[in-house]
Amino acid sequence: SQQGEEDPQALSIQEGENATMNCSYKTSINNLQWYRQNSGRGLVHLILIRSNEREKHSGRLRVTLDTSKKSSSLLITASRAADTASYFCATRTNQGGKLIFGQGTELSVKP
Amino acid sequence: EAGVVQSPRYKIIEKKQPVAFWCNPISGHNTLYWYLQNLGQGPELLIRYENEEAVDDSQLPKDRFSAERLKGVDSTLKIQPAELGDSAVYLCASSLAGKRYNEQFFGPGTRLTVL
């Protein structure tokens, strides 16, 4: 069973625009991670935010976490065609090391 | 440094046949995961190993799926017999236990098609 829901399921934007993806989850977490998956490839870890953090930046990525609403967002600024991929949020609970993935957002960045 | 290696990358079999997938984790990573990813979905954990020990196999359908990790390095995942619904991508990942916020490194996956 998957913990989270991601919104939107698909997003199409022009190069240079910003892309925002949202993730909601159900249970208390230790941390939340975002992964990218290019077509036919494995997942690549992008960024991790701990439950006591509210915002984190890494290059063109900005992640926010609202534990009261059990939600997170991933913002990609100044998008590039190479950002075209599926993006997944994954939560790690305080019990054990299991990661539970959302269903993903499919991002298409048109040149 | 080599990443997580999986083979084969693609496998097509007929239903009721057996199939096996192989994974070589990143050197030094003692935690290994097998995930199932259906089309348009996120990965779902099948089994997690800490060294040779399977510490979480609650989602592994044990009537037809089996896994092993001899010597705590490479791992194989087997399905016998395969069913049509097993068509999916099987992902292997590894991480370094002891790191508190264990980032997982994924292999490219094996895409299984059951006809």
Image (tube, coloured by chain):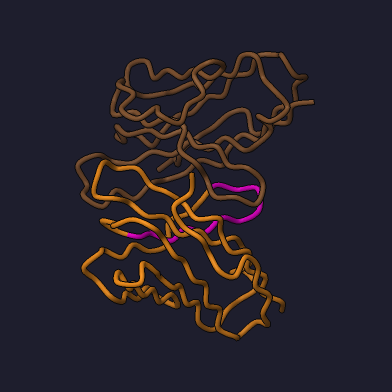
Chain colours: A orange, B brown
Quadrant in which residue B87 is drawn: top right
- Image quadrant in which the C terminus of chain A is located: bottom right
- B98 vs B108, left or right, is left
User: Could you say which is closer to the camera, residue A39 or residue A93?
Assistant: A93
Could you tell me how many numbered marks the image carries?
0
User: Is A14 in front, or is B63?
Assistant: B63
Q: Residue at x 77, y 19 (%)?
A: B14
Residue A21 falls left or right of residue B27: right
Q: Position of residue B16 (x, y in %)?
A: 72, 14
**Splitting the image into 4 quarters, where does residue B80 fall?**
top right
Comparing A111 with A102, the one in front is A102
Between residue A41 and residue B60, name the one nearer to us.
B60
Residue at figure coordinates x 35%, y 60% from the top left: A32
Looking at the image, residue A27 lies above or below residue B45: below
Q: Looking at the image, which residue is at 34% across and 42% down?
A: A98
| A9 left or right of B68 in image | right
From what the image shows, is residue B23 above or below residue A86?
above
Is residue B7 highlighted in magenta? no
Residue range corresponding to the magenta coloring: A32-42
- The spot of residue B40 in percent (x, y) is 65, 52
Q: Position of residue A54 (x, y in %)?
A: 28, 75
Across and down, in percent, residue B10 comes to 69, 32
At x 55%, y 55%, the residue is: A103
